[in-house]
Image (tube, rainbow, N blue to C red):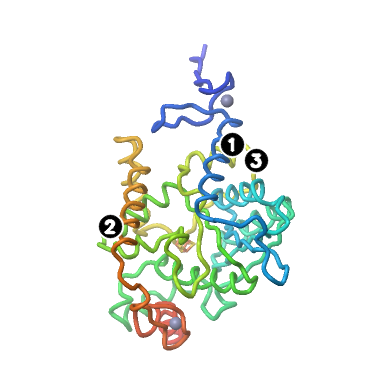
Amino acid sequence: MPPAISVESCSRCDHPSVVHQEYSGQHLCGKHLASSIRKRTSKELRQQLKLPKDARHEDGSPYRILVAVSGGKDSAVLLTMLHDIIARRRDVELIAGCVDEGIDGYRAPSLECARDLAEQLGVRFETLSYEGIGYERMDEVVSRIPAMGKNHDEAKGMMPCSFCGVFRRQSLNSLAEKVSADVMALGHNLDDMAQSILMNFQKGEIERSVRLAPHTENPIDGIVPRIVPLRWIPEQEIHAHAICQGLPIHHGDCPHAPGAMRQQSRGIVAQMESLTPGARHGLLHSLDEIRRLHRETERDPKLEVRNCSECGEITSKEVCQACTMKRWLAETA
Ligand code: SF4
Ligand SMILES: [Zn+2]
Ligand SMILES: [Zn+2]
């Protein structure tokens, strides 16, 4: 006889559990996981997005939330949660926006998953490609990285994600502008947040951590504020929830991801969490505390703001990173 596989039951009912929250000691079934995620998301949303009773603009148009979707589990859960929590409000409109990076075999199927979900929910769906705003497809960018490295010391050893991150940020800003979004919601989960915090600390970039979303208390001039309602939910719980709900999600990985610093950070965060359950929450709590202290001590942040001499975007340099990369690409055309 094969050994019986024992599945722990849910800590709140008799059903079999689908996740074990090591950090809280709880086991949760699909239904209780869903209600727990919804509760944490609503709470975080209330803190990050303080909407008046009637959020419409003076001209009567609704308050617009652009939800950045990718076809992956995080943004699928984000979109369904926001839809569940907010869609009944007639003064608020949700718009799903997907950036097409131009990555063969990866983006097309995931974009279709994102479109499917938006259609199922009756949410308007918009896309924008890198080529659409003057960059190149990511596959093409990757093939030119060695040549760009030869031309510029600064570009030497740069990984695909360093380019992609800058281009995606610009694309999302353009999408936000295109749909007149008031705020942008991103699907970052607790693991993503912990990894970003760790990577910034490793590089000594506290300022960068302070500027991480949510931007509720720290708005950045010139860009649509970002909110991250899933930031306290671990990746594994989001994944389990997406599967339990049968959401259309793409499981493939981007072919350009290997070697990125985030991959390294992902392993470290997972290891920290398994040795000390609650470590991810601890990292995020630490960041919130640093941000609070930073807000209290900040003199006049506006003094340091500069505009890119080419595109006008906010930057710390003469020419912003996006325009610099655009120039590198043009030189290797
Ligand atoms: S893994 Fe890197 S290259 Fe691939 S989509 Fe993400 S940021 Fe872009
Ligand atoms: Zn249960
Ligand atoms: Zn620029």
Q: Residue at 62% across / 59% down in the picture?
A: 111
Badge 3 crowding class, 10 Å Cα cut-off, few under 14, some 14 to 19, many 20 or more, is few
Amino acid on which disc 1 is placed: Ala
Among the 4 quarters of the image, the one containing residue 16: top right
Figure disc tally: 3
Q: Which of marks 1 and 3 is in front?
A: 1
Secondary structure at badge 1 equals helix
Residue picked out by circle 1: 34
Residue picked out by circle 3: 246
Q: Which of 255 and 99 is in front in this view?
A: 99
Badge 2 crowding class, 10 Å Cα cut-off, few under 14, some 14 to 19, many 20 or more, is some
261 is higher (above) or lower (below) than 168: above
Residue picked out by circle 2: 201
> Which residue lies most toward the top here?
1
Q: Residue at 43% across / 78% down in the picture?
A: 314
x, y percentage for residue 73?
56, 48
Amino acid on which disc 3 is placed: Gly
In whole angstroms, how far apart are the C-alphas of marks 2 and 1? 33 Å
Badge 1 crowding class, 10 Å Cα cut-off, few under 14, some 14 to 19, many 20 or more, is some
